[in-house]
Image (spheres, grey):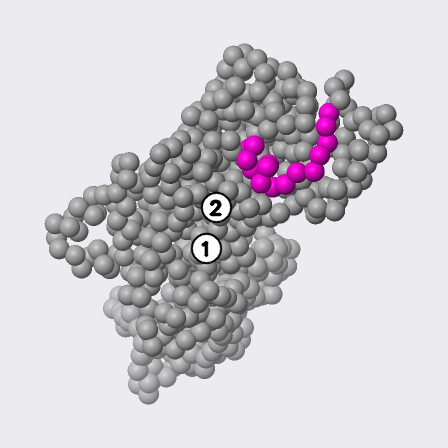
Amino acid sequence: MLAPLPHLTFVMGGRRGRAMTMAERTKDSGQKLEPDDASSRIATAHLAAEKGRGRGGSLKEPSVNTGSPVTESNGNSSAPFDQEDASSTASALDLQSNGQRKPTASKPSASFFPQSQSCSTVIGFTSPSSSHGQDGVGRANGYFSPASTVSGNLTEPRSYAPRVPGQLVADGSPPPKFDLGRAINDQQPDAVGLEQASVELPSQPPKAAGEGCSAELLNLINTPSGLPLLGTAMDPENFPFVEAPRTAQPMNFGVVKLKNIPFATNRAEVIALVGRNSKILKDSDEPVHIIMERVTSKTMDAYVEFINLDEAMKVVDKHHQNLTAGRPSRLGDRPIEVELSSQGNLLRDLFPLARGLIWDGATPYTKAFNPHFGWENFRGFISEEEMVMLIKHVEVPHRSPYSRDCPQRPYECLISTLKKFPWHATDRITLSQRHAMYSATERLLQVLSVKVKRGCNGLTTQLLTRLTNTALACPGFTPLMKDNISWLLSVPEGEQRFFGQPRFAHSWRHQYSLAPKPGTPLDVIEAKEGQQWYVAVIRKQTQRDMVSRPHVVRTEMQELGQQTDLYWGYFWAELGYGFGPHFDHMTLAQVAVAEFSAVERILSRALPHF
């Protein structure tokens, strides 16, 4: 009874020393192997599936003493253990029993562990450095990363094999078949992306400081410190801001005057009268001006502008010849008079309340102040009352009998007013007068857009487009005013850029004369993802100035800043504009001096001088 004890002790010691193979268990117990537990059956199923796919381990299923080989799921017969494995196992047992070699806990071979589907599938996803590495015993370490091999951690890596719904039932059958090649192909883009990321990303050079910038911005930041000198930044070739009203220069075009026209005369009839071959100004310059008295909406005379004086004289001579031949020029049923005129007469009729002026072509000159006849002194080119009455003519047209037969007359009058207004005379235009013109423009656009949608007679989409383009091209309106009009009419962003609008025009709230210079790249004016220029420099410098002020002043400025847009920083505090009648009576020239001086002061604190 005590004879088998040494043998049992050896088996238990063998289990403690290393994992016993299935051959040793069979030889030791003298009984055939029975898949009596779920783990052994699953391992056998995995080995059978891998052997059928050509990746099986060295472990073979023992034969059963039934006289016939065991049939696998793929139809192939299995063989008993190799004689070489049995002889090596027997030699190991003999050495230990003779005392020549002691059992040690050696590192188990990978060939003795059943390889799972996930472990085999992940071979194709390992990087070249890890898949070709060698472990401590000299075997190929294609299944584990180098770090896990060195540390001795043989934990299976993350499985990238396709999963099947449900769990594998421990019934001794192989796992469900699936196309490993298809699984690898499905995952190959991800694997290639990971491999490329690990190889290519470190080789990408860092972006240059000026990459993606315009040439103008590169000329500014191409310095050791990344900041240009103050003189370079204020140079007219680099400075991106202009006084917008002064960009409108007076032009002395040839002018023809049409007298005694009918009240319902429209623009198309006037163009047909002068002839389609006559060289009038292009449509975007609005060559036809039908004068309307803004208070009563009564139609007066009409003017037509030509590219030069010679072309205007040709049209006048032609109509005089027709009159001599007994064919007077007519508009409708009424004969009219055609005569040569000038820009001065056109502007004098278009702005009848502009007293105390001498018009030299399109340039106005102010007369000396007359203390005895105050009504003869200059008070402005237009009055706020005129703009209010212009709005009333479109809001309640039934109260304007003269414009009832020609509903487009108030809109065309506003187009002529914006086009021919002497914006270059900034020292004689106040903020209140400009605001009155802007309010009238905004209101007329609102009413016209609604009536065009309704399909009112005489009001067309072409008229709405003409008025919109005239308002957006008006040099006297600020970027914020034009942005309001663009938002009101849903003007596309591309068209706004065509009219010189900045990228964030809605944030230009305190710029009453400052505007982007035409043709300046956007990244020179405004901040762009790591590149900062004029607006960003002004914003950051004013923020630094605000922080350096006393606590009471700083707190008050921060509270006021919450009520406005801080895209320009505290530029409004640098300007120091007040509120009330004094601010309303400031001229465009005065606000231009204040704004350009503030920009220069801020840049002088932010940029080096030498």
| Residue 327 shows up from this direction | yes
> Does the magenta portion include 347?
yes
Q: Considering depth in this image, is 377 or 490 the residue closer to the camera? A: 377
- Say which element carries label 1: strand
In the drawing, does residue 7 fall left or right of residue 347? left
Q: For mark 2, does the 10 Å Cα neighbourhood hold few (<14), some (14 to 19), or many (20 or more) residues?
A: few
Closer to the eye: label 1 or 2: 2
Identify which amino acid the numbered label 2 is placed on.
Answer: Tyr
Residue sitting at x 48%, y 69%: 218
Residue sitting at x 80%, y 33%: 320
| Residue 276 shows up from this direction | no
Identify which amino acid the numbered label 1 is placed on.
Answer: Val
Q: For mark 1, does the 10 Å Cα neighbourhood hold few (<14), some (14 to 19), or many (20 or more) residues?
A: some
Q: Quadrant of the C terminus?
A: bottom left
| Residue 69, percent from left and from top | 59, 60
The answer to which image quadrant residue 30 occupies is: bottom left
Residue sitting at x 40%, y 36%: 377
In the drawing, does residue 419 fall left or right of residue 551? right
| Magenta region | 336-350
Q: Quadrant of the N terminus?
A: bottom left
Residue underneath mark 1? 242
Residue sitting at x 65%, y 19%: 263
- Say which element carries label 2: strand
Residue farthest to the right, as pictured = 325
Q: CA distance from mark 1 to mark 2?
A: 24 Å
Q: Considering depth in this image, is 549 or 95 the residue closer to the camera? A: 549
| Residue 540, percent from left and from top | 30, 59
Residue underneath mark 2? 365
